[in-house]
Amino acid sequence: MAAAARSVAWYVKELMGDHDYARHVAHLRAHHPEAPVPTEREYWRARWAEETARPGARCC
């Protein structure tokens, strides 16, 4: 039962993008070590601004 709950929690976090900042930081450190790492707040503000500027194929 606990494994099922962990699986559901993982799925919801992936769906909501909870791990995106950590992935972004890992990418920056691996591929662009000279680039400054934004704070989590800066990352999400930039991401939301990008999504607003170019909505693409969103449902909402």
Image: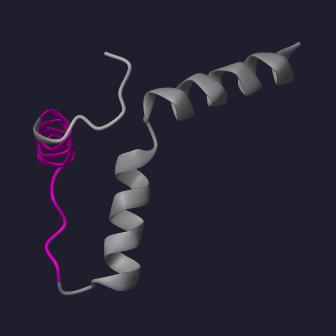
Quadrant in the rendering for residue 53? top left
Residue at position x 41%, y 47% in the image: 20
* Residue furthest front as drawn: 57
- Residue 38 covered by magenta stretch: yes
- 39 and 47: which one is in front? 47
- Count of marks placed on residues: 0
> Compared with residue 55, is residue 23 higher up or lower down, i.e. above or below?
below
Residue at position x 43%, y 35% in the image: 18
Seen in the image, is 26 located left or right of residue 44?
right
- Residue 23 covered by magenta stretch: no
* Residue furthest right as drawn: 1
Q: In the image, residue 52 lies at what x, y percent?
A: 14, 33
The N terminus - image quarter:
top right
Seen in the image, is 41 located left or right of residue 4?
left
Residue range corresponding to the magenta coloring: 35-52
Residue at position x 43%, y 57% in the image: 23
> Compared with residue 54, is residue 23 higher up or lower down, i.e. above or below?
below
Main SS of residues in magenta: helix
Residue at position x 19%, y 66% in the image: 37
- 1 and 11: which one is in front? 11
Q: In the image, residue 19 lies at what x, y percent?
A: 46, 43
The C terminus - image quarter:
top left
Q: In the image, residue 15 lies at what x, y percent?
A: 53, 29
Seen in the image, is 4 located left or right of residue 42?
right
Q: In the image, residue 9 lies at what x, y percent?
A: 64, 22
Quadrant in the rendering for residue 28? bottom left
**How does the figure colour the protein chain or chains?**
one colour
